[in-house]
Amino acid sequence: MQKSIFEISKMDCPSEENLIRMKLDPISSIKQLEFNLSKRKLTVYHQGQLDDIEQSISELKLGGKKLSTEETAQVSFHQESQQRKLLWAVLAINFTFFILEMTTGILSKSMGLVADSLDMLADSFVYGISLLAVGGGLIRKKKIARLAGYFQIMLAVIGFMEVVRRFLGAEKMPDFSTMIVVSVLALIANGICLYLLQKSKSKEAHMQASMIFTSNDVIINLGVIVAGLLVNWLHSSKPDLIVGSIVFVLVIQGAIRILKLGK
């Protein structure tokens, strides 16, 4: 049995973890994957096929780099009996906030909230793909990944068109207070998701606050909050449109990453 440790520089939230799991799933020699999100490290226990593992990680373009490979006497691993329940929990949280942010974003005329809702939907897709693919095989997993990726891109493009229309037309002032309140709730929800997933990986590991603030999801939440404050201060919708545009780009990047899994 070999133990290979990889540094994944762009692995800063559970979505990347699930994408890596999906990508490495077809490699039969892998016996166990251990993730450390706070340190951006992945430990792979495997029997051969190191080149295939390295290539698969490289294809994800998450900044993966092998740090070491060594022989290990470890042959048995602790199976997390609660992992499926926790995946359902974080899926439910993300999808609930997708609906909440999409609804409040439309009602408050905030493109930042609408874009953030799509980021929540993107995470829901990744968790849902992992759950639906259980027992369904690689072909089913790839079909679901393609469907999720195309749907996500379609929504992001529609959002971009609305941003452009608002930039060129008369300003629609978003409700800054709704932006801030809902984003704060989403910030808390993302923190809960990260906490649950971290606990599922290691009973001894404690949650570090710095891990939350390095998460892309949390940065997006903070960005929408700042945009809400600037909307109120400048009496302009431009900060909301700018943040919305940035988040739509991130959503499309995530969708493209999911589509690569469907090839």
Image (cartoon, helix red, strand yellow):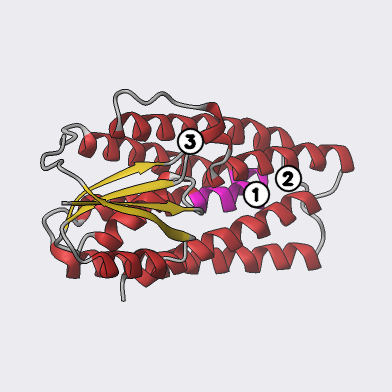
Task: Give how far across and how far down residue 83 sits, in percent.
Answer: 23, 37
Judged from the image, the secondary structure of the residue bearing numbered disc 1 is helix
Residue bearing mark 3: 190
Q: Position of residue 142 (x, y in %)?
A: 26, 69
Q: What is the span of residues highlighted in magenta in the rendered image?
A: 105-119
What amino acid is found at the position of numbered circle 3 in the picture?
Asn
Q: Which residue is mark 1?
A: 112
Q: Which residue is mark 2?
A: 174
Which quadrant of the view contains residue 46?
Answer: bottom left
In primary-sequence order, the first of circles 2 and 3 is: 2
Badges 3 and 1: C-beta atoms under 8 Å apart?
Answer: no
**Closer to the eye: label 2 or 3:** 3
Residue sitting farthest toward the front? 71
- Relative horizontal placement of residue 46, taking residue 64 as reference (left or right): left
Residue 64 on the magenta span: no
Q: Which mark is residue 27?
A: none
Contact? badges 2 and 3 (CB < 8 Å): no
Residue 90 or 200: which is nearer the viewer?
Answer: 200
The residue carrying pointer 2 sits among few (fewer than 14), some (14 to 19) or many (20 or more) residues within 10 Å by Cα, namely many
Q: Earlier in the sequence, mark 3 or mark 1?
A: 1
Residue at the location (58% across, 53% down)? 115
| Lateral position of residue 109 relative to residue 10, left or right | right
In the picture, measured across the screen, residue 249 lies left or right of residue 65, that is right
